[in-house]
Image (cartoon, rainbow, N blue to C red):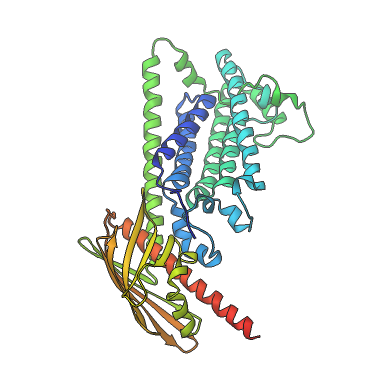
Amino acid sequence: MTHDAPAYGLWMLVLFNSAIFLMFAFSFFKPQTARDWRTFSAFGAFIVALFVEMYGFPLTIYVMSGWLQTKYPSLDLMSHNAGHLWSTLLGEQGDAHFRPLHIASYVFLGFGFYLLSSAWSVLYKAQRSNTLATSGPYARIRHPQYVAFVLILFGFLLQWPTLLTLVMFPILLVMYTRLAITEEAEMRAQFGEAYESYVQRTPRFFPHMGQGSTAGWACHSQGNNMHYGDMMGRLKDPNCPAGTAFAASSALAACAAKAAFLHLVALCLLWFSAEALAERDVTITRDADTIRIDAKLRVDVQHHIAWQVLTDYDNLARFVPGLSSSRIVSEPGAPMLLKQTGRSGFLWMTVPVEVVVRIEEIPLEAIRFSAVSGTLKSKSGEWRIEAQDDATLLIYRASIVPGFWVPPLIGTAVMAQDVRNKLVGVANEMTRRAASAKSEKL
């Protein structure tokens, strides 16, 4: 199980993609009022949360890694493809970008941005003339811009679902619905019977299928039903443009700060849950630069099969997550030296690791190791196996001084989950070999 290039820790891609999509949406939506900014800021928080996990730090993958590694032992959790969770859960093979759900996501995204653009041009003309927007998309639904945002968000969920965006999506649905209802109350107050008549013939979000002309969606694309009466009057007033612009900017800053704070709180809560999951069978302690690992896992295989897997040094990279290569480099008869290479990820860092360890075996009992060279300043410890009826208890203990910075708290939580993934990979191989041996006897 290997991944040649880092799929995460690409923070420039996070910034670039977030900026591109937000500017793209901004150019279509053109927020002007405080409500516009709240709508756009909520959308922006979703987009940032999405791309942070897509290219920066895969929080959802870490939280679910124990279950994913058990359910899909051949899955490389640090590969980009692993983030397309719908494809994995549906058992699809090959590049996820060419699977039906991913292709469907492009349809939702494309139509969402088209609808957002078409709705704005109608709204702009209606606001300039202080009239109702009832043509273009507004001939079919009363709130095409909210529908457009939901289509875009849903398209992204089809591409790259995350725990945070899955939680945010229904919250945003409720938020947009409440904003639409508030907006309608303002329209009734401003336009009276003309707006009531429009409401009677035009649904809020879902168009009447088979009724009316479909040309309303295609012809000149003219905007969203967001007439903000007094605010628009102030925006048009040449005597106070600076104050209005400042108010809109302040609203944006407040909403963005609130979204960022809630996002940070959610990330911390999810991180603590990930750490709690990891610590069920993995304990990480830290003393200055030294990190100590104590891990246990019970596997339902016989003692000798567990030993065979642990001592299959030249094939460890086939089933240990994150390990790219493993081979004996010592001469026959000399003390055994094992060289291993791989990658370790800590938040924004994806660090290549290479180490040569001296191996000492106590047959069918323990494998002791100590680093003699490599990117780690020091590493020593042991694998120990204990027979328990028809099962085997795996015990892994290590003391490591990394040759790179490991952030406190979060770094040790990530390391705990990484050790757990490796234990599960080893256990899965033991189970596979036990099943194979049993079938051969039959």
Q: Is residue 373 left or right of residue 352?
A: left
Which residue is situated farthest in the right direction here? 210
Residue name at image x 51 percent, y 72 percent:
429
Q: Nearer the viewer, residue 385 or 275?
A: 385
* Picture quadrant of residue 98: top right
Residue 383, x across and y down, in percent: 36, 76
**Outermost residue, left direction?**
288
Q: Residue at x 48, y 16 (%)?
A: 233
User: At 31% from the left edge and 75% from the top edge, which residue is drawn?
Assistant: 335
- Against 350, residue 107 (above or below) is above
Q: Quadrant of residue 116?
A: top right
The image shows residue 348, relative to residue 126, as above or below, that is: below
Q: Residue furthest top?
A: 238
Of 348 and 242, nearer the camera is: 348
Q: How many numbered circles does the render carry?
A: 0
Instruction: Using the image as rendered, state which of residue 357 and residue 220 is in the foreground.
Output: 357
Between 161 and 220, the residue placed more toward the observer is 161
Residue at image point 43% right, 87% down: 387
Is 189 placed above or below 282 here? above
Q: Position of residue 373 (x, y in %)?
A: 28, 62
Which quarter of the image is occupied by the C terminus? bottom right
Question: Could you say where residue 10 lies in the image, as x and y percent from the top left?
Answer: 41, 43
User: Where does residue 110 sit, x and y in percent of width and height?
Assistant: 62, 33
